[in-house]
Image (cartoon, rainbow, N blue to C red):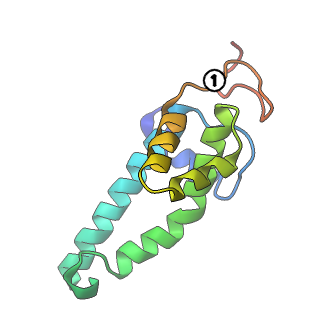
Amino acid sequence: MTPIDWATRPLKKYADFTGRAPRAEYWWFYLLVIVVYFVGMILDSMIGSNFGGSGYGMFTALAAVALLIPSLAAGARRLHDTDRSGWWLLIALIPLIGAIILLVFLVTQGTQGANSYGEDPYGAA
C-alpha cells in the first residue's frame, strides 16, 4: 500500500472502533491530520478568521471536529493491535506521564498473529 492509502484508510473506517490498525496506518493518518490542521491554520490566517490572533479559527475548528471521531477510532484500533483496550486512550488525560505512556503503546509493534481483537493486519505471522 502507498502512504496515501494508509493515511486515508481511517477515514474510510470513520467510526469503526473494532479490529486492528497497524503502525503504518496510524502514523500516516496522524501525519495527514497534522497537515490538515496546518492548512486550516494557514487559511484562518489568510482570511483573518482566527480567534484573537491565535492562529486557530473556523477552518481549524472544522478540521478538529471532522477528524475527532476517526482519530479516536484509529487510536483505539492501534491499541487493539498491541492487544490493549481502546480505553487506554484515556491515559493521555494524566498530564505528561499519561501522554508518554500512550506514545509508548502507540509505537510498540503489534501482536504477531491473531489476538483478542482480530487477525494480524499484515497477514499471517
Q: Does 11 appear above or below 24?
A: below
Q: Is residue 125 left or right of residue 43?
A: right
Measured as percent of width and height from the top left, residue 101 is found at 50, 41
Q: Which residue is mark 1?
A: 122
Measured as percent of width and height from the top left, residue 92 is found at 52, 53
User: How crowded is the residue under tag 1: few (<14 C-alpha within 10 Å), some, or many (20+)?
Assistant: few
105 vs 30, nearest the viewer: 105
Q: Residue at x 71, y 43 (%)?
A: 85
Q: Residue at x 44, y 69 (%)?
A: 63
Picture quadrant of residue 72: bottom right
Give the tally of numbered discs. 1
Measured as percent of width and height from the top left, residue 94 is found at 51, 56
Q: Does 19 appear above or below 33?
A: above
100 vs 119, nearest the viewer: 100
Measured as percent of width and height from the top left, residue 44 is found at 26, 78
Inspect this view and state whether residue 120 appears.
yes
7 vs 103, nearest the viewer: 103
Picture quadrant of residue 33: bottom left
Q: Residue at x 46, y 33 (%)?
A: 2
Inspect this view and state whether residue 74 appears.
no
Q: Amino acid at mark 1?
A: Tyr
Q: Is residue 23 left or right of residue 61?
A: right
Q: Does 46 appear above or below 82?
A: below
Q: Residue at x 78, y 32 (%)?
A: 118
Q: Does 59 appear above or below 17?
A: below
